[in-house]
Amino acid sequence: TRGHLELWLNSRNAPFDNIRVRQAIFMGIDRAAGIKVMQDGHGSAGFMFAPGSAWELDDATGCAIPSWCPADDPAARRAEAKAILDEEGFDYDRTYLFTVESDAQVVGRATFVQEQLRLLGIKTDFDLLETIALRAQEQGGTWGDIMPSNATMAADDPIAGLGGYHRCASS
């Protein structure tokens, strides 16, 4: 595998500009199933940095982030997530654009996420892009509503990998 899966929700686009909607969506994704399906069970629900690295976050710190740790009862957590989406007036009739790099591993991982979203009642359509076109949309902020990505975090130098998370959206 090439690193970990990132999942971006475009906060420039409603309803993803609502933090409760974003949190509910992440609550509804079964991380343990993701490890089993996407990594053949060989992985962990780490907290951005590789487990066992000098920069690892412990479970208490990582699990303090809502929905970050795998749920003991994924169905109950998914029901809780759906209740939050309902409270926020989520539009289940709309189909959301899922911008996906046309890379076999990314498409496979995105398909898993698409199914997890379907279990929440969220409809998506893939917009499959070649890498150069995807990077242009990613850097310009013009991608759709949802975007998965493969990423690698350098365990010995987090600054090498964190630059992409801290870029400025100004013009």
Image (tube, rainbow, N blue to C red):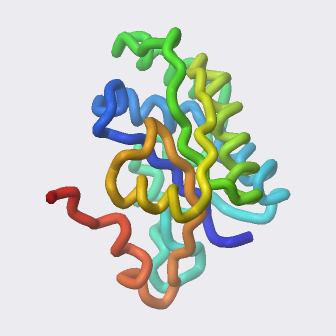
Residue 136 image point, x, y percent = 42, 60
Q: Nearer the viewer, residue 1 or 46?
A: 1
* Residue drawn at point x = 72 percent, y = 41 percent: 112
Residue 62 image point, x, y percent = 45, 57
* Residue drawn at point x = 47 percent, y = 14 percent: 83
* Residue drawn at point x = 65 percent, y = 24 percent: 118
Q: Nearer the viewer, residue 88 or 99?
A: 99
Quadrant showing the N terminus: bottom right
Q: Nearer the viewer, residue 24 or 134?
A: 134
Figure label count: 0
* Residue drawn at point x = 76 percent, y = 57 percent: 104
Say left or right for 52 vs 8: right
Say left or right for 99 vs 87: right
Residue 123 image point, x, y percent = 59, 21
Camera sees residue 73? no
- In which quarter of the view is residue 19 placed? top left
Quadrant showing the C terminus: bottom left
Q: Nearer the viewer, residue 37 or 111?
A: 111
Residue 157 image point, x, y percent = 43, 88
- The residue furthest left is 171
Task: Tell me if residue 160 comes above or below residue 149 in the rendering.
Answer: below
Say left or right for 143 vs 11: right
- In which quarter of the view is residue 87 placed? top left
- The residue furthest right is 40
- In which quarter of the view is residue 116 placed? top right
Camera sees residue 3? yes
